[in-house]
Image: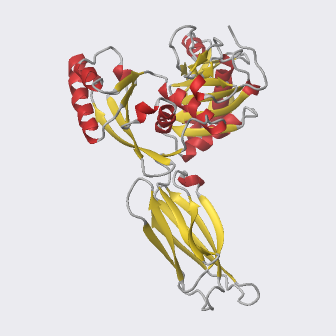
């Protein structure tokens, strides 16, 4: 059964991208009613979970191989498993690793013609969305969130450009890391799972395990979350018993530092049912989940939270690895009362951080910014000295303050002397400084 489409309906898509595959989860939502669940666009029923597209009906085959194949002497392009099969049968030219090629901005030569990797990635995404028809029609997509193991500035810009080539009128197109998708997934679960922190274990086929503990600060409003991660190696060559032993020891050490009320296991390394002692330990007073579509589901939830956040979900801030972890502000005098004026909010990604405002300098040749960490710790004053600024009476110097961030832990301050109208014309002085935040 496929539900009928209506203009009131909205699709929220989460797309997990890697060089090997893409995976798409989605919600169909007429209204964000968290307690009642969401409409399953395939069955018409109500579900609290996003639906993940499967390449084979009624099976959990979620990964669409990141491959395109142009059939020989034909305008037809195939995607995913069909592309790989056509390549094996020498029916055309197959292109893989599209994400890395697009990052490197390379060209691919096919039948004597050059194709930009960004254009090929856009074509791949277009073909993947076409696989979802007739369940999803592009006109009803309200938001798309892309998620990847590493989502830095250059990757985000590249993905945005590729998706922009499709010409879809989508309300929000955002990018985030796996850890941020994990946070958004957990935010939409029962509050009990967040009671004492959460642990994500990603076990890759090369034997590397990344442990990410989701922590939070209860004393802030809104509540602030962040992750602490570390990586271990447990080679698959150890065999089932050896992996069970080593993983059990590793997870006991990790949970000894920060307890968790819920543990999520994902990755090829967990396949095969080898966990015995580790499973007994993990299930002692905790909820344990295993699955391969956690990140695409989390990204779909993220799309919902950005467009139509359910009222039951509390306000919160997630501090990703490239986010500012402090509030940056300044004390100002307003109506003869001292107050705190925020310039940059914690949680903003460093490459999006920019603010410019004018102030009247109270007196002297310096002023203080106030850095307040939201993960705990004492506030810190950042003193900006304006050596050489002209001597003027109190409150007769207007300054323009520009704050930017050249990196995740660096704050650049640029101050321009604007003078004070015709009474004290500006002499054009500019001061710059960089602080560690």
Q: How far across and how far down the image is residue 127, in percent?
A: 67, 22
Q: Nearer the viewer, residue 232 or 289?
A: 289
Q: Which residue occupies 56% across, 11% down?
A: 85
Which quarter of the picture shows residue 415?
Answer: bottom right
Q: Quarter of the image holding residue 419? A: bottom right
Q: Position of residue 346 (x, y in %)?
A: 51, 54
Tell me: 260 left or right of 57: left
Position of the N terminus, as image quadrant, is top right
Q: Classify residue 417 as left or right of residue 244.
A: right
The number of discs equals 0
Instruction: Say how the picture is coloured.
Output: secondary structure
**Residue 14 visible in image:** yes
Q: Nearer the viewer, residue 187 or 77?
A: 187
Q: Position of residue 99 (x, y in %)?
A: 56, 33
Q: Position of residue 253 (x, y in %)?
A: 23, 36
The residue shown at (73%, 31%) is 166
Placement of 377 over or under 202, stated as above or below: below
* Residue 165 higher or lower than 289, as above or below: below
In the image, farthest residue toward the right:
7
Image quadrant holding the C terminus, namely: bottom left
Q: Quadrant of residue 377?
A: bottom left
Between residue 253 and residue 113, name the one nearer to us. 253
Q: Residue at x 33, y 31 (%)?
A: 208
Q: What residue do we see at 61% from left, 17% from top? A: 46
Residue closest to the eye, 412 or 315: 315
In the rendered image, the vertical position of residue 308 relative to residue 394, given as above or below: above
Q: Is residue 110 visible?
A: no
């Amino acid at each position: 059964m496929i539900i009928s489409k209506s203009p009131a309906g909205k699709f929220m898509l989460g797309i997990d991208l890697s060089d090997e595959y893409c995976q798409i989860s989605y919600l169909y939502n007429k209204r964000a009613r968290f307690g009642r669940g969401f409409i399953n666009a395939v069955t018409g029923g109500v579900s609290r979970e996003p639906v993940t597209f499967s390449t084979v009906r009624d099976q959990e085959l979620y990964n669409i191989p990141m491959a395109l194949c142009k059939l020989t002497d034909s305008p037809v392009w195939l995607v995913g498993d069909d592309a790989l099969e056509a390549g094996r049968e020498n029916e055309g030219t197959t292109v893989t690793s599209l994400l890395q090629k697009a990052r490197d901005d390379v060209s691919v030569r096919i039948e004597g013609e050059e194709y930009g990797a960004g254009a090929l990635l856009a074509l791949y995404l277009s073909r993947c969305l076409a696989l979802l028809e007739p369940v999803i029609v592009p006109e009803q997509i309200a938001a798309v969130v892309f998620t990847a193991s590493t989502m830095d500035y250059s990757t985000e810009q590249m993905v945005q450009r590729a998706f922009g080539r499709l010409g879809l009128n989508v309300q929000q197109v955002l990018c985030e890391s796996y850890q941020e998708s994990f946070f958004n997934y957990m935010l939409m679960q029962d509050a009990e799972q967040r009671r004492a922190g959460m642990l994500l274990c990603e076990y890759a086929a090369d034997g590397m395990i990344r442990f990410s503990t989701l922590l939070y600060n209860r004393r802030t409003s809104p509540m602030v979350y962040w992750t602490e991660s570390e990586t271990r190696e447990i080679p698959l060559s150890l065999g089932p018993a050896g992996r069970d032993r080593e993983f059990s020891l590793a997870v006991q050490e990790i949970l000894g530092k920060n307890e968790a009320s819920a543990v999520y296991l994902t990755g090829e390394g967990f396949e095969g049912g080898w966990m015995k002692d580790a499973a007994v330990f993990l299930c002692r007073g905790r909820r344990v989940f295993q699955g391969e579509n956690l990140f695409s589901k989390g990204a779909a939830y993220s799309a919902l939270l950005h467009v139509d956040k359910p009222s039951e979900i509390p306000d919160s801030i997630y501090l990703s690895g490239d986010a500012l972890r402090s509030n940056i502000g300044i004390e100002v005098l307003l109506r003869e009362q001292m107050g705190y004026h925020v310039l940059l909010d914690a949680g903003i990604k460093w490459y999006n951080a920019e603010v410019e405002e004018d102030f009247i300098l109270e007196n002297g040749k310096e002023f203080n910014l106030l850095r307040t960490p939201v993960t705990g710790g004492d506030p810190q004053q950042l003193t900006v000295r304006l050596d050489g600024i002209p001597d003027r009476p109190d409150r007769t110097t207007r300054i323009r303050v520009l704050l930017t961030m050249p990196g995740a832990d660096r704050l650049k301050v640029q101050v321009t002397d604007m003078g004070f109208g015709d009474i004290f014309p500006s002499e054009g002085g500019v001061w710059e400084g960089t602080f560690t935040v």
